[in-house]
Image (cartoon, helix red, strand yellow):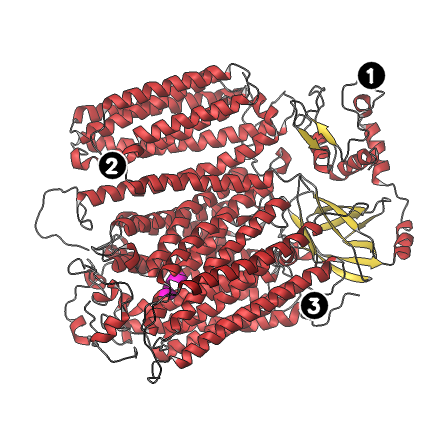
Amino acid sequence: MPHKPADVRVYGIVFVALLLLLALTVATAEHDLGRWNFGVAAVIAAVKAFLIALYFMHVRDSTPLIKLVVAAGLLWLCILFSLSLADYWTRAWL
Amino acid sequence: MPSPSTAGAVSNRTPKRDYLSAGYTVRSWLLTTDHKRIAILYLLSITLFFVIGGLAATVVRLDLMTPQADLVETETFNKLFTAHGVIMVFFFLIPSIPAVLGNFIVPLMLGARDLAFPRLNLLSWYVYVLGGLFTVYALLAGGVDTGWTFYAPYSSTYSNTYVMATAVGIFITGFSSILTGLNFIVTIHKMRAPGLTWFRLPLFIWSIYATSIIMVLGTPVLAISLFLVGMERLLGIGIFDPRLGGDPILFQHLFWFYSHPAVYIMILPSMGVVSEIIPCFCRKRPFGYSFIGFSSFAIAVFSFLVWGHHLFVSGQSIYAGMVFSILSYLVAIPSAVKVFNWTASLHKGSISFETPMLYALGFVGLFTMGGLTGLFVAALAVDVHVHDTYFIVAHFHYIMVGGAVMGYLGGIHFWWPKMTGRLYPEGWARFSAILIFVGFNLTFFPQYILGYLGMPRRYHVYPEEFQVLNVMSSAGASILGLGYFFPLTYLIWSLMYGKIASPNPWRAAGLEWQTTSPPPTDNFAETPVVVDEAYDYQHIDGVSPAGGAT
Amino acid sequence: MRIETAPRAPSPLAHHFDDIQQQHEAGELGMWLFLCTEIMFFGGLFLAYTIYRTQDEAAFAAASHELDLFWGTVNTAVLLTSSLTMALAAHAAESFQRKQLLALLAATMVLGCVFIGIKGMEYHHKYIHGLMPLMGLPFEWHGASSGHAEMFFDLYFLMTGVHALHMLIGLGVLLALLVKANRGGLQGDFAAPVRITGLYWHFVDIVWVFLFPLLYLIGAR
Amino acid sequence: MIDDGFRLLPEQASTHAPRVDLLYFFLLGLAVFFTVLIAALIIYFSIKYRSSNRRVDRTPGSGHALVLEIAWMVIPFLISMTIFGWGATLYFSAFRPPAGAMEVRVVAKQWMWKFQHPNGRREINTLHAPLGQPVKLTMISEDVIHSLFVPAFRVKRDVLPGSYATCWFEATRTGKFHLFCAEYCGTNHSRMTGCVVVMEPAEYEAWLGGGLANESPAVAGKRLFEELRCASCHMPEADPVRGPPLQNVYGHEVILKGGPTVTADENYLRESILRPGAKIVQGYEPIMPSFDGQVDEEQLIQLISYIKSLATP
């Protein structure tokens, strides 16, 4: 969809934010946060992915249909994960 | 809505501008981007694969007439049933209705000039052929013996047959499937004629749309599972290798995440075809249009939630087994909705029994039986007993052959006049339809009994007490084979000698019948504007009150 | 075949679409659907990763610490920068800035190549140190338990390998765009290919954004 | 002897079999009912509303009926939930061996079944079992996936490489019954068959005593335990205590490093021998070497049997 001319400044801000998040995730990895290391890294990665998708890929300005397609992709990924892991995480129960 | 019901033998012949006469060179076919020509290319190639897969099945059934291995070597037998499965599933059933009938009919039904991405469409066919060549190479070079399911670690480590070439072939063909599905989704969203709202769409479009969702979201997972098997064989990356702590069940999860929904790739388009045929030969709007439509979506979504029912005895957690069992029963509901609605559509119709209708009614019956035995195999304790036996073989053949192939043949007959401009010989066609129905039941019904008795599938030698039922099944298969041979013959015959078809020989609703038979390259002289609901048969029959379609 | 009799100026509109907006929306929707298939394709790999990591977190952490965090971080920055140049390239194409378009496409490609180069260097390093359990190469692991450490490196090479393959495909497409842009194409209404390639490129970037912490940042370093 | 006459149903030879069959008959009745219903409706409508019949009322209805649609969604849903509950209950009991079941170890390989009885007696492709006594099979494969299937018992379970699978049965009839491999496992898959011989308990005891001098898996495991010098770390008298003592480990909760707990079952013990680093017991260091490649499947079973014998149930 031809969206409105992208704002170059927004790209710049998003890019700086991405680099800061990268620095943050590397910095936290230097510290032992126990089981939180993974959680923090995952959250930061998700935020970065969202920034790229929303601004670089223009999901923010896209039609509802495109948003639906993105949501469907993520939903199906969740299906794959949740039902597979439902097996792995309950296997030793019997 | 204009409904040209007079047999237009003359009007159709004069302007030689239909898609078939747009060019006669091989080049004009191989470089075409016309969805109709691509459909014909698919038709030819999947028929070729159907014949190869059918021949493999013939030898398998012949060999199983006796309990001992006396026709072919066991290794050959294993390669034959693998070839049958791989070819029929990936190279015939999955592309059958979407790539042939879908390609041909979807743009016509939408009032569009072509699919959204015509060159991508042609590419899909080439990709399909390339994948087919790899698989054919594997078969000629020596075959593959893993079964179409490629379970690790047998496929990844132990089999020393042509697993790699076959896996590459299927991997490549997967792209064809993805691109076709993608093309349909975009086309259905973006290329509908003015006035053609979602609830005016023919039900065939709904089902093709649902199918495309599965193709787009499921196929990549098959790709990754075969890719991992390939990497294990090629590079020794042991994702499924128990010696590295790898889990063979993970392969099954990934494989069935696609391969269960794949069953719906095969059956949903057939349901769509049946939803076109029944209203036409009942001369009325289908009962519960929106319920049939939405149940297609429900099936597409639920189909992704149930794959673990293939793993009830695999070592999957029994709690996960229960989750998958309960979810599997969800699929029963939209399936039941469809069957009941089709049946109710007959009520107060004006029913005639041309060949497409015979196939459609046969479909409803056989799909009902296949679907009801689905309740057996989703019931955990019963599945433990029948898993990997002939009960399963019978169950999925009722769905895939009794369902999908019957729908495919019904659709081919229904749209044959549109595709070729010729009528097929009705008598022969009715005869073969009945032959196929009888032969099919004789082939596969005994296999239910065989399965519950405990005969495992993929057995070359088997205990003697199973022989009677096996012989019955093989006898039925010969009738079935004959039934398939007839259409192959008379349809080719009709290309030259069949009666010239009018634009709308069935006086059917739907935009595809408003253009000439065969349609011109650009499909419509001018973009049609839709003002009526789908299946407006009262209107059509009101215009020409002949009553009945004959 | 459609035969055109009258010569016509190159139009961005293909014959089977009604208007340019319909065509653009179709192209964009098509690419997003394709990206959904990519999500599922990588999803299978991420699932395998999740399952094996939860089975032996310690082995994964120990194996992860053999990776070079410095170069991994540099590579992430390189790829994020290439995403920026790609986004700017699409902007340049839409606003008829041919020179910027060429420069930005070239920059994206250079950054992509740098990424691949660094990746290759890391691979070579693993090869030297016997941490490349491929094709029967020796796996010289001295940590506590071997099974899942080898599994980690299997997954490392699979996931980064598949990712790098996607990069290479992207670079090929970018090269084609560069040639086309050099001939004066891809401007204004013709810019759709740049935008659509951009979607792909950003997606590949997103995959790396997840791969980086999953492979390089397990446990405390 | 195996009954090789023509039949429509397999023999019922376990406590589980008639229960599965009951559900099967229920499903069969349901399937027949709906098939007949649909077929009858199709035929009835086809005749009544054939196009040549002009005397029938064809006044169009509304084209849909919400009540009808809801009915044929809700009724199949309720029926299928009944089937689910029924099937799940049976499934649960089929895969949950009763306490005190006699344990037979099964090792599958291309293309044979190897069985070992509790007293150590081994046999190939034939499994002798006592009548009226629960028998638990603990199974593992040396190569690809196999599946143990005894139709007369309605029992089937995949036999995996790399982890133990279990199933159980209690035979209710003496005689000889088919045993199949149900998961395709390569060229001679269809020849990987055998039989289960169910005997009167006394006869079975006599049969067990026959054959060569046997050594029970637990006794063999104790010998192996000593040969591999496991005791130097794993016995309470070991000094210094470098590995967790193994008395009363099997079947009990083990606290792992960092807090999570795990129940020490066969698969846990197996993993700890082959990949000791995966689950470190709290308070110990990951210093144990892997025994992967040093012990084969049968020796692993022996070691595990020995560790099991050290635990009070």
Asked if the magenta segment contains residue B41, the reply would be: no
Residue B501 visible in image: no
Q: Which mark is residue D239?
A: 1
Amino acid on which disc 3 is placed: Glu
Q: Secondary structure at mark 1?
A: loop
Q: Which residues are magenta?
A: B270-275
Q: Is residue D257 above or below residue B87?
A: above
Task: Tell me the mark number nearer the camera, choosing from 2 and 3.
Answer: 2
Q: Which residue in the structure is indicated by mark 3?
A: B464
Residue D278 visible in image: yes
The Cα atoms of the two marked residues, 2 and 1, are separated by 72 Å
- Residue name at image x 24 percent, y 66 percent: B513
For residue B238, what is the image quadrant? top right
Q: Secondary structure at mark 2?
A: helix
Task: Return the residue nearer the eye: B35 or B236.
Answer: B35
Amino acid on which disc 1 is placed: Asp
